[in-house]
Image (tube, rainbow, N blue to C red):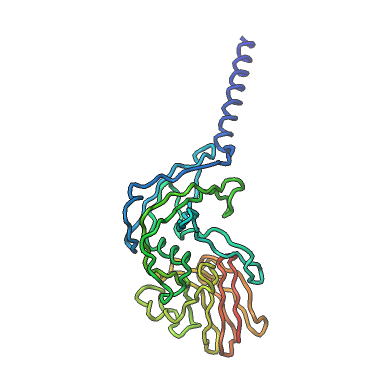
Amino acid sequence: MKNKLLLGALLIGIANLFTSCKDDRDDNPTVKSPTAFTVNTPATADQYIQLAADNNINLTWSQPDYGYTANVTYRVQVGVKQDDGSVTWSVKSVKDDDGNVIGSEPQYLASTYYTCNATVSGEEIAMALNEIDGFKTIDDYVDKGFREIAFRVNASLYEVDKVVSGTAIVSEPVFFKHMAAYCAIKSPAYIYIVGDVNAIGWAEPNEANAASYADYRLYETEIDNNVFEGTFDVTAGDHYFRFYTKLTGWDDDSWGPLPDDNTNIPFDFAEANPFAGTIQQGKGSWLLQNFEGGTITFTVNMNDNTVSFVKH
């Protein structure tokens, strides 16, 4: 009887060992580096398509083979097919720390996708085509008519906001034979400075106050660089302020030095000019103390979550 019990315990232990190994493989899959994936040719690929803000393009594809059902981030790139068969893809400049252009990299549309299909905004596509054509202002725009437009999809796995090595792959292109853009020139994005550093004080950052906040926007120093800057006249005294990316009320899209409401980081230009700090999502504020009045340039870098305030 004792031998039977020992044998039974041994068999249970072996079974648990195999179950444990199986669970480990399920929870920690071996990630494969995919070699190819294809965007499906849409049924509308041969039709004449006039882009518009409310005219979207649908793309579908199959998930690249990562060896398991992965959580993939997809981005779309637009290009123009040339007479020689090559494609001029949308790209952006890469600069060094001194602002010198040292190369280029793919420029993807602003929207990202997490399933194997995308409803791509006609406005985003038109903006990308305008950039490829070199149109920077409305006065630059020239109607190019219907052209053959290419799309391809980048698939990547992310871990802590970084692409996992070996997981990024770009699909083969798919072509729309007749597609026409329109004048949709991309302009710099902006954020708002909210608080008593401005003339309207702590007016709620909502659409009802949009006209009042129009004069208190920080604009990107370059389109899509995510670095915002604005210069404002500020009266003498102590001032609290933080930043909002949208006018959707107090609780949404608020950015300050600390996450909690009713907390602040004090600073004084007599001690540090410029003042340098960090920014995070939340309703904490900066407290500018003992300000004698004058002009301040506020810079917010959303790439590395830093801020710089300079008194002139």
- Compared to residue 121, the image places residue 40 above or below, namely above
- Whether residue 27 appears in this view of the structure is yes
- Compared to residue 123, the image places residue 270 above or below, namely below
* Residue found at x 51% / y 69%: 255
Is residue 154 or residue 159 the one in the foreground? 154
Is residue 33 or residue 257 the one in the foreground? 33
Percent from the top left, x then y, of residue 59?
39, 49
Q: Quadrant of the N terminus?
A: top right
* Residue found at x 54% / y 47%: 169
- Whether residue 78 appears in this view of the structure is no
Q: Residue furthest front?
A: 84
Percent from the top left, x then y, of residue 272?
67, 80
Is residue 62 or residue 264 the one in the foreground? 62
Q: Which residue lies furthest to the top in this view?
A: 1
* Residue found at x 58% / y 22%: 15
Percent from the top left, x then y, of residue 22?
57, 30
- Compared to residue 132, the image places residue 230 above or below, namely below
- Compared to residue 293, the image places residue 218 above or below, namely above
